[in-house]
Amino acid sequence: MTVRTGRVAAALALAWAVAWAGAGAVAAAVPEVAPAVFADQMTGAIVPVHDPVIIREGDTYHVFSTGLGGQMLDARTSRDMTDWKVEEPPFRQMPDWAAKAIPGAKNMWAPDISFVDGRYRLYYSVSTFGSNRSAIGLATNATLDAASPSYGWRDEGLVVLSTRSDDFNAIDPNFIADRDGRHWLALGSFWTGLKLFALDPKTGKLLHPGEKPVSIARRLAPIGAPAPVEAPFIIDHGGSYWLFASYDYCCKGVNSTYYTVVGRSKAVTGPYLGMDGSALMQGGGTIFLRADLEEQQRFRGPGHIGAFRDRDGTDHVVYHAYDRQKNGAPTLRVATIRWGADGWPVAEQ
């Protein structure tokens, strides 16, 4: 696996509408055993959370997520991945370039966090609900420790822009460095699906601006009908690349039909296939996270994962789901990935 690191009813309704976005992250691998994590034991500031990603610096786990309740982005920390507290957000206001590029955008969506060449890279989305006039920006920091004199987010500006004339939506970014040292940014929500852009390793921005991206996943739908696929996240494990994607609809509380599938490929550019050979470019894949029967499952619409490998080599995912016992509140969840004898990932919640 590449290491990088994933109120009240009225307020929640606004949060669901705002959080159409997606995205992911993976943490740095250093030998040390982390505690076992069970989602139902989680406490603290785990509501409302949408589109979480996670990374570890030192003995602290950091989760970044879509900005809710007036924030640009939300930030949380934990020492054990179980008890979470709210931290200062990376941004207090929209960067000037983003406010001009996407008029009407009120917050930032679906971040992705990585550690590359000595700095943390935070990719983020800027958009308005239901539109593909969208942008992905990049901010960097020397540390995630707000008490450090080296702490300070530096906005690096635009990475990818989509407009109404494009067939993709520039939200839900996810960074992946392949085994050949090439850097990529996966992204996308609805339209013609998920895309992969080559990045300049030095800048974290597009390697070839204007170059057509690689298509890696798509849902098939009648002309003019929605094609619900979003939130790509790619990891490298066992000699294969694994693409996770969220299908169907988030942001509807307990009525959300969101779920997560996974496909495998020998190349980071695909093709990604499910265990049964079904292609993600044809709406296929193998189910990784899905709610049980409605009358049996407390947490509905699980999806928009961010994966990371902890210091003991254990793989985990963070994601959000809607809690039936809390009026459908979007809730932070954590699952451990178990790699089965067949080589495929299973989420142990």
Image: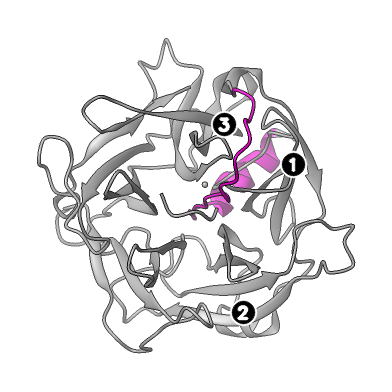
Apparent side of residue 94 relative to residue 173 in the rendered image (left or right) = right
Mark in the foreground, 2 or 1: 1
| In front: label 3 or label 1 | 1
Furthest residue in direction front, as rendered: 31
Judge whether residue 28 is colored magenta.
yes
What residue is shown at x 31% (from left), y 82% (from top)? 165
Q: Amino acid at mark 2?
A: Ala
The secondary structure type at the circle numbered 1 is loop
Amino acid carrying label 3: it is Arg
Q: State the residue position of label 2.
A: 98
Query: Closest to the observer: 97 or 263?
Result: 263
Q: What is the magenta range? A: 9-36
Magenta part, dominant SS: loop
Q: Which mark is drawn over residue 59?
A: 1
Up the image or down, 3 lies above or below 312; here it is: below
Tell me which residue sits at (35%, 15%) in the image.
293
Q: Give the side of residue 238 with respect to residue 302, left or right.
A: left
For the residues labelled 3 and 2, the Cα–Cα distance comes to 30 Å
Q: Which mark is residue 333?
A: 3
Does the magenta-highlighted stretch encompass residue 226? no
Q: Are marks 3 and 2 in contact (CB under 8 Å)?
A: no
